[in-house]
């Protein structure tokens, strides 16, 4: 697979991941965090805001792989 194809597929996957992660975080915040301590809510928002990075790292590293050279 060429690097252009990997970047296209990876970009779409990252957009889907960020959208799904954001919707899940919003739904969880609205259902669970309504009557919770402000400190715990702040921790949730930090984790929810940065948590999508861990699943995105393998996608980005896959996108950045160089093409296999033909011998």
Image: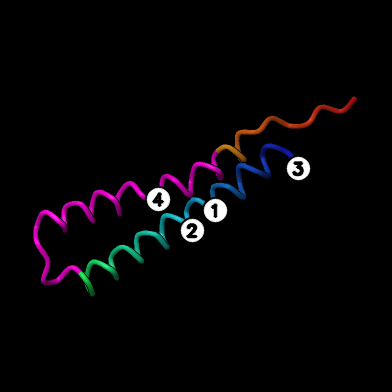
Q: Which mark is residue 1?
A: 3
Task: For label 2, count other residues whose C-alpha is less than 10 Å away and answer few (under 14), some (14-19) or many (20+).
Answer: few
Secondary structure at numbered mark 4: loop
Tag 2 residue: 16
Looking at the rendered image, the disc whose residue lies closer to the viewer, 2 or 4, is: 4
Q: CA distance from mark 4 to mark 3?
A: 26 Å
Is residue 31 rendered to the left or right of residue 69?
Answer: left
Task: For label 3, count other residues whose C-alpha is less than 10 Å away and answer few (under 14), some (14-19) or many (20+).
Answer: few
Looking at the rendered image, the disc whose residue lies closer to the viewer, 4 or 3, is: 4
Task: For label 1, count other residues whose C-alpha is less than 10 Å away and answer few (under 14), some (14-19) or many (20+).
Answer: few
Looking at the rendered image, the disc whose residue lies closer to the viewer, 4 or 1, is: 4
Tag 1 residue: 12
Q: CA distance from mark 4 to mark 1?
A: 15 Å
Q: Which image quadrant: the N terminus?
A: top right
In the rendering, at what x and y percent does residue 35 appear? 11, 71
Name the chief secondary structure element in magenta.
helix
Tag 4 residue: 52
Secondary structure at numbered mark 2: helix
Foreground pick, 6 / 29: 29
Work out whether 1 lies above or below 70. below
Q: Which residue is found at the position 48% from the left and 46% from the top?
A: 56
Could you tell me if the residues under marks 3 and 2 are in contact, i.e. CB atoms within 8 Å? no
Q: Which residues are magenta?
A: 33-60
Q: Which image quadrant: the C terminus?
A: top right
Q: Which residue is found at the position 29% from the left and 70% from the top?
A: 27
Q: CA distance from mark 1 to mark 3?
A: 16 Å
Q: Earlier in the sequence, mark 2 or mark 4?
A: 2
Could you tell me if the residues under marks 1 and 2 are in contact, i.e. CB atoms within 8 Å? yes
In the rendering, at what x and y percent does residue 2 appear? 73, 39
């Amino acid at each position: 697979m060429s690097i252009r194809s990997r970047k296209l597929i990876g970009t779409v996957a990252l957009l889907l991941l960020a959208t799904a992660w954001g919707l899940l975080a919003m739904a969880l915040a609205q259902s669970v965090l309504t009557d919770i301590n402000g400190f715990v809510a702040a921790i949730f928002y930090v984790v929810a805001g940065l948590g999508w990075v861990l699943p995105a790292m393998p996608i980005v590293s896959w996108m950045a792989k160089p093409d296999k050279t033909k011998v």
